[in-house]
Image (tube, helix red, strand yellow):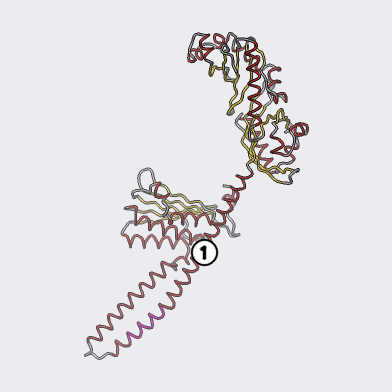
């Protein structure tokens, strides 16, 4: 424990600024912490900032806290202080203790040494320090006892043959690590990397997360200090979750495809079978009407009513089969959306415009169906909820993408509308777009209204997206 007469100071190691001081120090210096922080460091400690900085950058200090001996951290004597280096949450500190007696000093040193060792021993991971040379060679200054539990090697063995750290690493992950190290060197930002290691002793692959903060030493060498942890279980769970989502997306795409095929079949049967039977009925009624005597006014009237019912049923057949699978889709997505906007305007009496930059483009069957169904669902939502006075639909083509924009000037969608449990229409749009490797966005506009944006890769003649899309 610290003696009651000890003065303790905590400094920022980079800027040599006072962060905190013990109560005893404030009493001795006759000032509150805020006052001590504002006055020159020399007035507080009795040593100049330059002298303290020179000591921290001295070879003895660097060797003590930046070399392999840091596995047994200790205090160094500086002027009337016992000083040690601390790194916590990627920041570096200096702890200075001005003891009331040598006995108190020794007790403090022993306690801090013991505390550091306990902390490292109970850390779930591998605590390390390493440096890189100009040839991308690695050397470890310090490795905790967690080395064997994580990498299947003793710390001393890895220190003696540090290249094994790279040898057991997945090649793609190694390339990313070296790129991240280079980026960390350039900007002196924290290194945060995850990758796979082949553990030879256990004949198994392990996922490891490496986090380290860089420090530029007085000789210009960059040193990283941090921790490596085992993230195998969470990584495998994440991969499994992503695969599960992919399978669900594939299932959703398959169900949509089956549903469209079933709609096409039902529409065709309704049009051919029911339409054919209605045609026969209409012809029969016309023949019956023709042969009715003039004095059978009641029968003539009933026949006329039946003909009207047949005509209305014809209209219903055309409407239902059109809703199931519009024949206009056979002419391509441009013609289909143009027809749809006109039908929307006619049905709901809301002005609806359609614009495109290429009238001759058709897209694939899957793209045409997806864009048509999304437009159909979006315009249905506009009619139900938007209270819009105008709708604009645009279909734009480029060498690498097909973009559909549906914009209204209504009340605008709220975030809660998107998150509702029963928002199946919006989720259906997203799933349709995801099945075609596209992008979907629905947003409330700054002034008023809502915009639905769909971007699909423009499929080339070889059936693949253009290179521009793949590298986007």
Asked if the magenta segment contains residue 196, the reply would be no
Taking 442 as reference, is 120 left or right? right
Neighbour tally class for label 1: few under 14, some 14-19, many 20 plus, Cα within 10 Å = some
In the image, which residues are magenta? Answer: 275-286
x, y percentage for residue 35? 48, 12
x, y percentage for residue 372? 45, 60
Is 69 in front, or is 302? 69
Q: Name the image quarter holding residue 163.
A: top right
**Vertical arrangement, residue 328 with respect to residue 448, above or below:** below
**Vertical arrangement, residue 6 with respect to residue 343, above or below:** above
Q: Which residue is mark 1?
A: 257
Q: Name the image quarter holding residue 139.
A: top right
**Vertical arrangement, residue 25 with respect to residue 470, above or below:** above
x, y percentage for residue 343? 36, 63
x, y percentage for residue 95? 60, 18
Is 199 in front, or is 250? 199
Q: Name the image quarter holding residue 143.
A: top right
**Magenta stretch mostly in which secondary structure?**
helix
């Amino acid at each position: 424990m610290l003696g009651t007469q000890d003065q303790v100071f905590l400094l920022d190691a980079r800027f040599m600024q006072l962060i905190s001081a013990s109560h005893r120090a404030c009493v001795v210096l006759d000032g509150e912490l805020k006052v001590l922080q504002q006055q020159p460091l020399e007035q507080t400690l009795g040593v100049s900032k330059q002298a303290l900085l020179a000591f921290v950058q001295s070879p003895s200090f660097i060797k003590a806290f930046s070399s392999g001996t840091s596995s047994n951290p200790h205090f160094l004597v500086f002027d009337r202080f016992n000083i040690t280096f601390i790194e916590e949450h990627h920041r570096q500190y200096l702890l200075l203790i001005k003891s009331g007696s040598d006995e108190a000093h020794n007790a403090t040193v022993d306690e801090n040494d013991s505390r550091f060792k306990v902390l490292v021993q109970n850390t779930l991971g591998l605590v390390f320090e390493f440096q890189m040379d100009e040839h991308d060679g690695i050397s470890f200054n310090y490795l905790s006892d967690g080395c064997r539990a994580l990498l299947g090697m003793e710390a001393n063995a890895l220190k003696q043959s540090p290249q094994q750290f790279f040898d057991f690493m997945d090649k793609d992950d190694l390339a990313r690590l070296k790129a991240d190290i280079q980026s960390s060197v350039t900007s002196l930002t924290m290194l945060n990397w995850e990758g796979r290691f082949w553990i030879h002793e256990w004949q198994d692959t392990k996922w490891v997360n490496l986090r380290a903060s860089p420090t530029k030493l007085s000789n210009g060498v960059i040193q990283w200090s941090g921790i490596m942890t085992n993230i195998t279980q969470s990584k495998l769970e994440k991969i499994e979750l992503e695969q599960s989502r992919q399978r669900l997306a594939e299932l959703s795409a398959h169900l949509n495809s089956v549903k469209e095929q079933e709609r096409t079949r039902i529409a065709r049967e309704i049009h051919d079978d029911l339409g054919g039977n209605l045609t026969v009925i209409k012809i029969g009624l016309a023949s019956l009407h023709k042969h009715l005597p003039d004095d059978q006014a009641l029968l003539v009237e009933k026949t006329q009513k039946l003909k009207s019912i047949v005509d209305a049923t014809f209209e219903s057949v055309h409407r239902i089969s059109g809703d199931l699978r519009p024949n206009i889709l056979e002419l391509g997505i441009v013609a289909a959306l143009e027809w749809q906007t006109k039908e929307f305007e006619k049905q709901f009496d809301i002005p609806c415009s359609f614009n495109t930059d290429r009238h001759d483009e058709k897209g694939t069957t899957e793209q045409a169906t997806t864009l048509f169904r999304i437009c159909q669902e979006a315009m249905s939502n506009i009619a139900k909820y938007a209270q819009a006075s105008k709708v604009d639909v645009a279909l734009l083509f480029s060498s690498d993408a097909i973009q559909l924009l549906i914009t209204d000037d209504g009340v605008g969608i709220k975030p809660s509308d998107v998150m509702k449990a029963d928002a199946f229409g919006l989720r259906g749009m997203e799933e349709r777009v995801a099945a075609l490797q596209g992008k979907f966005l629905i947003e409330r506009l700054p002034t008023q209204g809502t915009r639905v944006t769909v971007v699909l890769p423009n499929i080339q003649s070889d059936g693949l997206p253009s290179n521009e899309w793949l590298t986007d």
